[in-house]
Amino acid sequence: MGEAIILFSDISKHFGQVIAVANTNFEIYRGEFFSLLGPSGCGKTTLLRMVAGFEAPTTGEIFIDGQPMSATPPNHRPVNIVFQNYAIFPHLDVRGNIAFGMRKSGLSRAELDQRIDEVLELIKLPGYGSRGADELSGGQRQRVALARALIKQPKVLLLDEPLGALDKKLREQMQIELRQLQQQLGITFLFVTHDQEEALTLSDRIAVMSDGHVMEIASPAELYESPGSRFVADFIGSMNFFEGEVSCRETSTVRVTTRVLGEIEVPLTTASPTTGERVWVAIRPEKLQPVFSEPQSRTNTVVGQMGPSAYLGDRSHFYVHLTQREEPVLVALQNLERSLDHLRRPNQPVWLQWADDAVVLLPRD
Amino acid sequence: MKTGRTWWRPDGFLVYAVAYLVFIYLPVLFLPLFSFNNSKYIAFPLKGFTLKWYQQMLNSPSMLEALMNSIKVGLIVALLSTILGLMAAKAVTRYRLPGRGPVISFIMVPLVIPEIILAISLLILISQADIPLSLWTVGFSHLLLCTPFAMLVLVSRMEGFDRSLEEAALDLGENSWMTFWRVTFPIVLPGIVASMLLTFTISFDEFVLAFFLTSTDATLPIYIWSSLRFPTKIPAVLALGASIFVISFFVVSFAEWLRRRGVKMEATSRI
């Protein structure tokens, strides 16, 4: 895709007995919006802090733009960070905060003032220069933290869950603005979040992390539509899993025998498992199409009984109990009609159908 | 919304609060009262208004010298103990020190040792080392006494300090020295002022250590103590006491204003 701006080479980090980051190798491309996604304690923030220079790796080397960083202190690294709590200097006004890192820039007073005005314009806070830190709302503090880092023109901007403290509406608005800003400036963003929706919305590529390991690195659509492991499939969005075994491979399809769904056919891909392999048959809830009267076609169809449902506004979730399986199947349905009567029929039969390519096969052992 | 209790109805708490304030401030108010009283005896009834005790105070070189001695010692002790306290507080709150707990308790020990014990042991040490007693030895003992107080004040200030502010300064290109001056110091400043005021006050009115460890140079508490034997000197001491009281009032108000400003700043640094 492009040339690497950050390269993690055999990076690991131990805190005493605790392994925060296990041996890690990957690269982040220039100009990319890259997210580290994982539950809290998965090592994503530690990885970010190692790039910033606040933590020293136990093993390995981080290269930024080709330069090894282990001997470079944070103040000499070509990266800047936006902290989770923004870390706005409380004793300085907005202008003072933004100018903080420019002491050694060699700009004249007038040039610096002009740069600050440009950055204030960029973050949509023109005229806020003389506001005190305590006179800013959460969203405004976030913008000032961004401006303070961006005026340094870093090679990589590091963002540590910067939207976590904002309410939902503001967060969605800031997501759009962050994405626009990144495309406008062309700076590489390394973004840490535990919010999968945020990562999917913003990123070019996402590294899913768990227990200090990078589980998978892929684009949002790849992660969602063709995850590489049960963990990733389960972590991103919701997924129904069924046990299965490959009975045979044909020219364009793989046949999988399952106890619950019967024998199904899945399009053959390069990553398809071989005959006899045990697999998870995985189907997303929104890719199961409910039919409330007996359908003509019986291919890719399973019958069950309506269970509890949840109304979520734009869509509804409901559970379907299958005879062969204790755990109910989750189905997501767009609320295309205002009447929701079809969901309120407990224990009535419902047929679930899916397209051939809705199914993902994942290794099971 | 009415809770049924209006503020002017006397209840237990109000009575207690008034009694408490009277208990605290009534004795202190005798000081200015008698300092303006035209009589050398501290007794009622009052004999009329006069400023002559204040004049006598200004005309008493030995009293002014003692005052200057106390101010000198107090200022130096306040400065040094605050610097030491600041360094200790930074070490304790910022680094994972081995044996951090024992080190802190060790530094805090002078807080709980009776001053007279401290005074005697210092006197033994200093005379064994053949160091002549002077204001320097008093200052040294006050430093020992004041540093734990300074550290207490500054540790609480440093603990309430968001660490990512220092990291942000590093990240924005400053080294740790400039980070201290541009971020840590201005934010901790209210704590530093509070510590200087506290340690100055402790040193200024400290009696026991000064009594044991000084030679001919008296500090103010020692001067006052020795004046008690001469009734004629007492009204001037009252005048001095009243002056110090008024000055302290303004200094403490200023410190409280600074502290509140600091609390406000701290609140905003945490989102």
Image (tube, grey):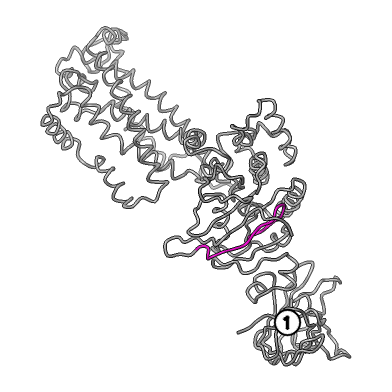
Near mark 1 (Cα within 10 A), the count class, few <14, some 14-19 or many ≥20, is some
Q: Position of residue A29 (x, y in %)?
A: 69, 56
Secondary structure category for the residue under label 1: loop
Q: Main secondary structure of the magenta part?
A: strand
In terms of image quadrants, where is residue A349? bottom right
Closest to the observer: B84 or A280?
A280
Q: Is residue B126 above or below residue A27?
A: above
Q: Position of residue A288 (x, y in %)?
A: 78, 80
In terms of image quadrants, where is residue A120? top right
In terms of image quadrants, where is residue B129? top left
Q: Is residue A329 in the magenta section? A: no
Identified at 39% across, 51% down, the residue is B96
Amino acid at the residue labelled 1? Ser
Instruction: Output the chain of dot 1.
Output: A
Instruction: Indicate left or right for A308 with B231 as reference.
Output: right
Residue assigned mark 1:
A272
| Range shown magenta | A20-36
Q: Is residue A30 in the magenta section? A: yes
Q: Is residue A30 above or below residue A350?
A: above
- The quarter of the rendered structure image containing the C terminus of chain A is bottom right
Identified at 68% across, 52% down, the residue is A189
